[in-house]
Each structure stands twice: as C-alpha cells, then as structure tokens.
Image (cartoon, coloured by chain):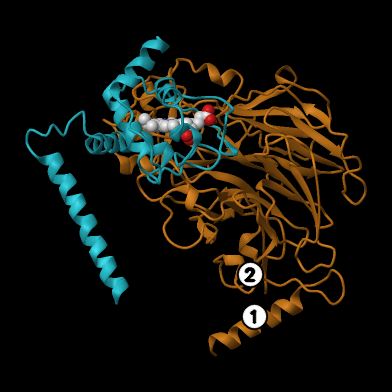
C-alpha cells in the first residue's frame, strides 16, 4: 500500500516536472528555439526520421553487420569532433564498432546546416538509452571549417 | 481425436519412419519443431547452434555438414565441419578451420569450395568427404573487388567443371554519389566492368582472376542466393533489389511505395544475360521493367526492352540469401524440382514493419515457376512484429539438402542450423 502511494507520488511529481518543462518551453519570450536542449531534441528527431532512420532504424538498433547501432557506441557518446566529422564526411571504412563490423557506406550529410547537425546529434545522444551533452551549432561550424 | 493423441501419433510415426544411423537412435523433430511453423506433415529440429554468423552451408553424401561463417575479421575459424555420429540429428562433433570471412561454401566431387570476400579456395576431400589437410587451401580465384558493400562472393558450380561467382556492385544504384538524395546515375555505369554480375571461372584452375574468367551475366546488383538447376542445366540466381527509392527520390516515391518496391527477382540465366541494374528495376505490381529514377525514370516510364525479364518476382527488400532446387524424395511430390528460397528479412522497409525472415517454396512446372510462391517455414525471427531487423532472433540465410532429402537452414544471428524433415 505504502509502495503504491510512493509510486503515485513519484508519478505525480515527475508529471509536474514534465509539465513545467513543457510550459517553460512554450512560454512566450522564453526563446524555446536554438538555445533549449528540449527543442533541439525535438527538431533533431524530425531530421533523424527523415534521413537517418532508414539505415539506423527507429529504435537506433541499426541493421546487423550492415548499418551500426547508435546505442551507447563509443562514437555516439564519445568525442564530439569525431562524431560531427562522421556526419559531415560520412564513413566508409572497415571500422570495428562495439565488436562488430559493418558493410555499407554512410553517405556524407554535409548538406545539413550547422543547426540541423547539432539538433540531430543532440537527439541521438539523448535517445535510445543514450545520455550525453548537447551538440552546439558552433561546434559543428568549427569542425566544418577545419574539414574544408 | 484430441491434440494430445494427435501429437503422440505424429511422434510415433516420426520415430518409426526415420533412424537409419546407429541402431537405437532415431531422427525426430524437436517438441516445438525448433520454434518453426511448417506445413502439416513436416517437423524440424535444431541440429546445431552457437556457430556464429553462419552464412551458407553444404551437406556431404555422408550427411556431414560444412558451414561458412563470417564476421570474425579473419581471427576465428570460419568453416565448421559438423558430424552427427549417432544419427539422432543432433550434431555431436565439431571442428573448425579456415580464417577468411565470407559467405559461399559447396562440396563438389572430391573438393570443398569456400570463398572469402575476394577469393575462392578449395580443399581436397578424402573418400568420406573430409578435408584431408585443413591447412592446404588451394586458391582457385583471386583478387575480386571488395569495396565494403555487397562484398560476399557467393558462388555455385555446374556439373561441367565451371564455377559461377557473384561479384556484387559496390553501390546501391550507381549514383554519382552513392545513396545521396537526388544524385543521378553514372552513364554508363562503370561498376559493371568488374562487378554487378556473375563471373564464370574454371573449377579446377589455380589463381584465376578477372582476365581468366568471363562475365557470364551482368546487370545484377547483388546476388547471395544462386543454384545450378541440374534438371535444366541452368543457373538460377536471386537478386537483391535496390534500396531507398523514397530517401533518394522523395518526390516520386512515398514511404509505402518505397517499402514495397522494387521486387526481389529470380532470374534464369544464360551466357550473356543482362538483368538491367542499375538502369531499370522490376515493379511487381505493374509487372513491368521501370526506368530507375537515377536514369530519368519517374516510377511509371518503362525501360530496358532488351533486358531479360525475371523468372519470378517477390516483395521488395526481403533479401533472398539462398535458393535451392529440391531433388530429394523425402518431401511430397509437389516439392520435387521446385525451389526453396531463404529470405534473410528486410531492413529497408522502415518505418513500415519489416518482412521476410522465412523460407519460401516456389512451385515449378516444366522448368518454369508455376503458380504462387508460398511460405514454407516461418517463425525464425520469433513472435510479434519485427520493426527493426535487430529484433529478429534468427534470420534464415543458407539452404542445403541432405542425402536423405532433409532440408537444412542456417541462421546468421545465433548460428543455428535447422533440419526440416517430412513424415509420410
């Protein structure tokens, strides 16, 4: 009985938190755009669905030995410069990804704007069980400049 | 009669109709038919499991198996030799050798042929079809293109000393920029010189490469399943059709169309066959060869009048990884000289649910596909809808026929070998 109460209480609290986040993001003048991580994740999700989902799948689990998963891999959670570089330049190498190899090319996505790449990577780094810091448009810009 | 007695009767018949091996042991299906759903009268057992990414397999006249494994990056063993010493159908002896990843394997005469992603090798066998020296692989074909896409060199042999090797296109649709939205096709497609077809080599000549072989058939994007039909003396192949119509040309194809198109096609080849990749694809709804969007198509314009028609067409993206013409006598008459096809299961239907992950039977009459294909064995992937291929518990990949007429199916997720048997 006490457990149920505690669970209910917890649900209530988290519901309130979520509600607050939402209203904060929606509040006029609170600039939900570029700055907010929640908004970046929401925009990134759309980009993921349009471009990345076909290969990396809806749950980020990829395709065995063809397209790698985006779940807690060293690339997704690791060095942001490397991660941004993969999206800008693509990847077509015999690289080991968490103990497996993948035989398919990842095409470059340099047509995406800095903001879009930041959004999609922020989405990936905070979905499928991943938890990592946001990627900022400025960081994408810096990597893009170096690659040119 | 209730279910229980039915099951008991079925079991009893199985017990009496098999079991030539060692006295006292019998071949019988697993209680759950190895998790498979089969037509009535058929049963299945798990012959082996845990073999790694088991791709193709082949059975010796003695009933022993050789299974080809990939994904070890040339570190572990990539061929398993499997024996069932007491005839109960369960493998109880296993030895490994060979260091090269790859898909193809076949016993032909006194040789075991196996491929890496660039070469085809063979091993000499003794009179029990056992490899005499596992360290002595003779290189038959070498230096084939391997560019990180469609690199598996699946192959088969005819009865006149020829070897037929798939050299898959290192591209989806020969776009200037592979798999990039809106990018047009290269004209002509330069890949076809050295890939995107089936090459014919001599089965007994060492160190052959492109110059020694002949491009037997072209315009095939990638073929994993191929079999020599001994009744017709003809090569049959299953093409993996192109991906991503919607991703690459969203104005012409919506997600639903892209999930269904193009067909996965069966081709009956002859020397000089051109099956049309990358210029056209086959639309199984319009029953037409359609000009690819990379080459000016719009989903309706037809193309390739000189291009060979498929012998049969199947739903898109299901990835046919093996074809086997059944010549045994264990299964009922209707299966004789028809084709079993192992569909590995799709990935390129997302966000639509995935399809395939089953073994299909395609009836044949007078050397031609006759009538609709039917699902023969399913349940490999496990229960429920498969949204992404990683959810599939098993994926059918290779097919082989045992000397008694059993049908073997390999799985490249967990390395299970299924044996499907029939009880009259």
Work out whether residue B281 or residue B105 is closer to the camera in this orientation and state it.
B105
Question: Which residue is located at x 29 percent, y 34 percent?
Answer: A44
- Percent of width and height locating residue B116: 71, 33
- Percent of width and height locating residue B36: 57, 65
User: Marks 1 and 2, Cα distance to the nearest angstrom?
Assistant: 10 Å
Name the residue at the bottom extreme: B1
Does label 1 or label 2 sit earlier along the sequence?
1
Shown colour of chain A: cyan
Work out whether residue A3 or residue B385 is closer to the camera in this orientation and state it.
A3
Badge 2: residue crowd in 10 Å (few <14, some 14–19, many ≥20): many
Mark 1 and mark 2 in contact? Answer it, CB < 8 Å.
yes
Instruction: Name the disc covering residue B10, or none.
Output: 1
Q: Secondary structure at mark 1?
A: helix
Q: Which residue is mark 2?
A: B43
Work out whether residue B117 or residue B291 is closer to the camera in this orientation and state it.
B117
Work out whether residue B225 or residue B52 is closer to the camera in this orientation and state it.
B52
The chain holding disc 2 is B
- Percent of width and height locating residue B215: 65, 24
């Amino acid at each position: 009985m006490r457990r149920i109460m505690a669970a209910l209480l917890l649900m209530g609290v988290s519901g309130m938190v979520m509600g607050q986040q939402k209203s904060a993001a929606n509040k006029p003048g609170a600039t939900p755009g570029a700055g907010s991580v929640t908004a970046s994740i929401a925009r990134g999700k759309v980009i993921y669905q349009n471009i990345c989902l076909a290969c990396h799948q809806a749950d980020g689990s990829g395709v065995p030995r063809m397209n790698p998963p985006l779940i807690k891999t060293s690339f997704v959670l690791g060095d942001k410069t490397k991660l941004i570089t993969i999206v800008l330049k693509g990847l077509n190498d015999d690289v080991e990804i968490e103990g497996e190899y993948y035989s398919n090319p990842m095409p470059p996505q340099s047509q995406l704007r800095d903001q879009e790449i930041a959004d999609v990577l922020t989405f990936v780094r905070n979905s499928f069980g991943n938890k990592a810091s946001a990627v900022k448009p400025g960081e994408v810009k810096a990597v893009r400049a170096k690659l040119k | 009669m209730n279910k229980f007695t039915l099951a008991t009767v079925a079991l009893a018949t199985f017990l009496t109709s098999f079991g030539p091996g060692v006295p006292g042991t019998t071949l019988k299906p697993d209680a759950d038919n190895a998790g498979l759903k089969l037509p009535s009268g058929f049963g299945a057992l798990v012959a082996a499991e845990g073999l790694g990414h088991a791709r193709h397999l082949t059975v010796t006249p003695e009933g022993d198996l050789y299974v080809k494994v990939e994904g070890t990056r040339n570190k572990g063993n990539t061929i398993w030799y499997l024996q069932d010493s007491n005839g109960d159908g369960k493998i109880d002896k296993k030895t490994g050798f060979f260091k090269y990843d790859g898909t193809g394997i076949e016993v032909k005469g006194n040789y075991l042929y196996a491929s890496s992603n660039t070469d085809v090798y063979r091993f000499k066998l003794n009179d029990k079809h056992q490899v005499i020296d596992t360290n002595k692989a003779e290189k038959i074909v070498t230096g084939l293109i391997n560019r990180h896409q469609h690199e598996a060199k699946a192959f088969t042999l005819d009865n006149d000393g020829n070897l037929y090797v798939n050299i898959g296109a290192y591209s989806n649709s020969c776009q200037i920029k592979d798999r990039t939205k809106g990018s047009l096709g290269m004209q002509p497609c330069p890949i076809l010189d050295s890939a995107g077809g089936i090459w014919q080599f001599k089965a007994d000549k060492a160190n052959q490469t492109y110059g020694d072989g002949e491009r037997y058939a072209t315009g095939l994007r990638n073929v994993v399943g191929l079999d020599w039909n001994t009744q017709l003396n003809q090569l049959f192949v299953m093409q993996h059709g192109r991906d991503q119509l919607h991703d690459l040309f969203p104005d012409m194809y919506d997600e639903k169309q892209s999930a269904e198109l193009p067909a996965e096609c069966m081709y009956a080849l002859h020397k000089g066959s051109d099956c049309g990749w990358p210029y056209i694809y086959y639309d199984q709804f319009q029953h037409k060869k359609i000009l690819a969007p990379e080459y000016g198509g719009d989903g309706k314009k037809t193309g390739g009048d000189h291009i060979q028609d498929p012998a049969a067409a199947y739903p898109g993206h299901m990835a046919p990884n093996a074809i086997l013409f059944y010549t045994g006598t264990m299964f009922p008459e209707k299966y004789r000289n028809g084709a079993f096809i192992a569909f590995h299961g799709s990935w390129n239907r997302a966000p639509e649910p995935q399809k395939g992950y089953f073994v299909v039977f395609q009836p044949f009459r007078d050397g031609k596909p006759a009538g609709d294909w039917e699902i023969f064995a399913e349940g490999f992937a496990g229960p429920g809808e498969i949204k992404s291929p990683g959810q599939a518990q098993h994926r059918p990949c290779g097919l082989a026929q045992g000397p008694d007429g059993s049908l073997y199916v390999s799985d490249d997720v967990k390395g299970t070998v299924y044996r499907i048997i029939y009880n009259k």
